């Protein structure tokens, strides 16, 4: 087992290659991952629903021949359903809910040869940029267990960062892949809207804010996984231009001389921590050294308007989620079954009129067009991923007299990532910078709508210039 434990920090592509060469059996990789979960999860609280017996059975049988055959994988406990396994969405209300079918994304993950060994922690309904649900308790950042993992894919991020699995599922409605990638020192790509399917249960979530993908240790894993899962599903309401060639072929391809605009200020005017400013300036200099044209500039974004309209969608979406789950389960939803912030947000959403909602959608679509046109002048927009390094657990708690205080604090933490959920553009957080406290601080690169290819080419170039694979957090041994 010692040898297999040494393989824990190989990426998924390398692990799959060992399986193909018959140097390692799938069941050995699965058993090694399970052993690491049992050893490290009591500290991390990243995995909340083990699926060990299903995984061992799958690993011992006939597996699909895909790019990741035999590689262990974790599924975030939100949106992506796995038949016969509970899906709580991080909510006490759904603690015993068991879907009877696989989502299309899970079908494609299995087809790629991945073996799902468990489900990961997430905040209630994925609403917050930290993973501290009442149902399961807080996930702990493997770089500093007193700090947040980010959210809402925080359990997945902690698991990958600590080497429990080489990559794990995540989804992103306001930054929920990129936020934990920044907090945990990983590569996190939010694909273009509609690149990955949400069906059969959903065609659209929160009017296009939410997308599916993963957190990975390497750029090539993210690209190869997106090749395996992307593409339209029957009945999808949105369309995205298909890639010119497989995304994996972009990894290592020459990005050319890109025009990169960077900014260190938030459109909402909230202060940005000096570490996050330093991370962006460091990345800008690295891009300049690599031959790109880098200028300090940014699209004009009406930050307060975007924030106001985003909260309209977010609160209405929360109410829709609770009402929908009550309908699905046939149970009445009452305040005691939800966290106070969730219920307060739900009540805010119920106060929105249909006109309020449609106005918010229209205004955000208009802003999206304006931002899209700004990419006529540059290829990539570089910003901080977050306004702060990973903050202490409990930072987003709300006092009883102000249940929404945590949401206000969250908006200060994530002024950059939600913009791309509004516009639908692809964006990625790269782990290029660690601060003096040894905490990762991500840098955020935004591409044109449908242009993950440029981001993958640039990411691979930056990964080669500033490798991060050898960096392992304290909670990983």
Image (spheres, rainbow, N blue to C red):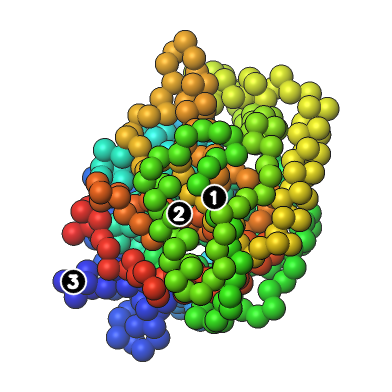
Q: Is residue 380 visible?
A: yes
- Mark 2 / mark 3, whichever is N-terminal: 3
Residue closest to the eye, 393 or 460: 460
Query: Quarter of the image holding residue 215?
Result: bottom left
Label 3, residues with CA under 10 Å away: few <14, some 14-19, many ≥20: few
Q: Which circle marks residue 280 in the picture?
A: 2
Residue on which disc 3 sits: 1
Residue displayed at 59% across by 71% down:
258
Calculate the distance from the C-alpha at mark 1 to the C-alpha at mark 3. 47 Å
**Where does the N terminus fall, quadrant-wise?**
bottom left
- Mark 2 / mark 1, whichever is N-terminal: 1
Residue farthest along the top direction in this orientation: 401
Q: In this rendering, which labeled residue sits more in front, label 1 or label 3?
A: 1
Residue on which disc 1 sits: 263
Disc 2 element = helix
* Residue 323, position as x, y percentages in the image: 66, 29
* Residue 306, position as x, y percentages in the image: 68, 36
Asked if residue 35 lies left or right of residue 149, the reply is left
- Mark 1 / mark 3, whichever is N-terminal: 3
């Amino acid at each position: 087992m010692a040898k297999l434990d040494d393989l824990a920090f190989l990426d998924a592509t390398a692990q799959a290659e060992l399986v193909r060469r018959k140097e390692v059996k799938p069941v050995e990789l699965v058993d090694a991952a399970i052993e690491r979960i049992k050893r490290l999860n009591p500290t991390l609280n990243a995995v909340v629903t083990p699926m060990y017996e299903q995984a061992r059975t799958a690993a011992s049988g006939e597996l699909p021949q895909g790019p990741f055959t035999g590689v262990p994988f974790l599924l975030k406990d939100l949106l992506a359903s796995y038949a016969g396994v509970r899906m709580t969405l991080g909510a006490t209300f759904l603690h015993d809910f068991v879907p009877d079918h696989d989502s299309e994304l899970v079908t494609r993950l299995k087809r790629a040869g991945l073996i799902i060994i468990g489900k990961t922690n997430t905040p209630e309904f994925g609403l917050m940029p930290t993973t501290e649900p009442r149902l399961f308790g807080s996930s702990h950042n493997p770089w500093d267990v007193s700090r947040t993992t980010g959210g809402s894919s925080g359990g997945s991020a902690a698991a990958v960062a600590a080497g429990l699995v080489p990559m794990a599922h995540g989804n992103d409605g306001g930054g929920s892949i990129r936020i934990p990638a920044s907090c945990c020192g990983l590569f996190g790509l939010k694909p273009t809207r509609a690149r990955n399917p949400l069906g059969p249960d959903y065609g659209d979530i929160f009017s296009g804010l939410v997308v599916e993908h993963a957190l990975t240790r390497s750029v090539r894993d993210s690209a190869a996984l997106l090749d395996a899962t992307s593409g339209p599903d029957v009945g999808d309401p949105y369309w995205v231009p298909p890639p010119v060639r497989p995304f994996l072929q972009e990894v290592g391809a020459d990005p050319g001389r890109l025009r990169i605009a960077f900014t260190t200020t938030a459109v909402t005017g909230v202060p940005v921590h000096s570490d996050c400013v330093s991370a962006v300036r460091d990345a800008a200099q690295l891009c300049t050294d690599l031959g790109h044209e880098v200028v300090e500039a940014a699209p004009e974004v009406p930050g307060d308007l975007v924030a106001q309209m985003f909260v309209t969608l977010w609160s209405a979406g929360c109410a829709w989620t609770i009402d929908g789950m009550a309908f699905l389960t046939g149970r009445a939803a009452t305040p005691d079954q939800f966290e106070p912030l969730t219920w307060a947000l739900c009540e805010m959403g119920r106060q929105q009129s249909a006109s309020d909602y449609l106005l918010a959608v229209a205004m955000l679509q208009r802003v999206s067009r304006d931002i899209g046109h700004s990419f006529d002048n540059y290829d990539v927009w570089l910003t901080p991923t977050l306004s702060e390094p990973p903050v202490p657990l409990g930072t987003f708690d709300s006092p009883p007299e102000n249940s929404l205080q945590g949401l206000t604090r969250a908006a200060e933490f994530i002024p950059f990532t939600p913009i791309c959920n509004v516009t639908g553009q692809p964006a990625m957080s790269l782990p290029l910078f660690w601060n003096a406290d040894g905490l990762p601080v991500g840098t955020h690169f935004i591409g044109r709508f449908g242009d993950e290819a440029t981001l993958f080419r640039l990411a691979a170039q930056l990964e080669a210039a500033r490798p991060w694979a050898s960096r392992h957090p304290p909670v990983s041994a």
